[in-house]
Image: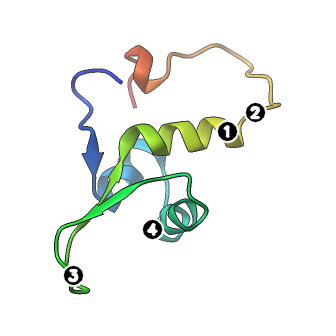
Amino acid sequence: MSGDVPRFGNAAMMKNLFGLSSPQLRQMVVQGFVRTIKFKNSKQGARLYLTADVENALGRLAIGRKPKTTAPTLSEGGAS
């Protein structure tokens, strides 16, 4: 990850970085691909997602597909 991408982010940030909806993120969490932190025990507590886990999960989904061009990933300093 580049230094300007936070280690954790909320669902809105994950949507901006990766184009994922909240249901898609929840599915990745249920499947065990993405770790989260929730600060309050109530429903209103903010849930944060580990950015590296989301990037790795998306990389696993892309296995077997050949890229048309080679573009740097977020961890290589590529732009979102």
Disc 1 or 4, which lies upstream in sequence?
A: 4
Q: Is residue 21 left or right of residue 51?
A: right
Circle 3 crowding by C-alpha within 10 Å: few under 14, some 14–19, many from 20: few
> Label 4 is placed on what type of residue?
Ser
Circle 3/circle 1 CB separation < 8 Å: no
Disc 3 or 4, which lies upstream in sequence?
A: 4
Which residue has dot 3 on it? 41
Q: Is residue 74 above or below residue 71?
A: below
> In what element is the residue under mark 2?
loop
Label 3 to label 1, Cα distance in Å?
31 Å
Label 2 to label 4, Cα distance in Å?
23 Å
Circle 4 crowding by C-alpha within 10 Å: few under 14, some 14–19, many from 20: some
In the rendered image, residue 4, in percent from the top left (x then y), is placed at 21, 26
Circle 2 crowding by C-alpha within 10 Å: few under 14, some 14–19, many from 20: few
> In what element is the residue under mark 4?
helix
> Label 1 is placed on what type of residue?
Arg
Q: Is residue 39 left or right of residue 33?
A: left
In the rendered image, residue 47, in percent from the top left (x then y), is placed at 28, 66
Quadrant showing the C terminus: top left
> In what element is the residue under mark 1?
helix
Circle 2/circle 1 CB separation < 8 Å: yes
* Residue drawn at x 37%, y 16% as measured from the top left: 77
Label 3 to label 4, Cα distance in Å?
19 Å
Which residue has dot 1 on it? 60
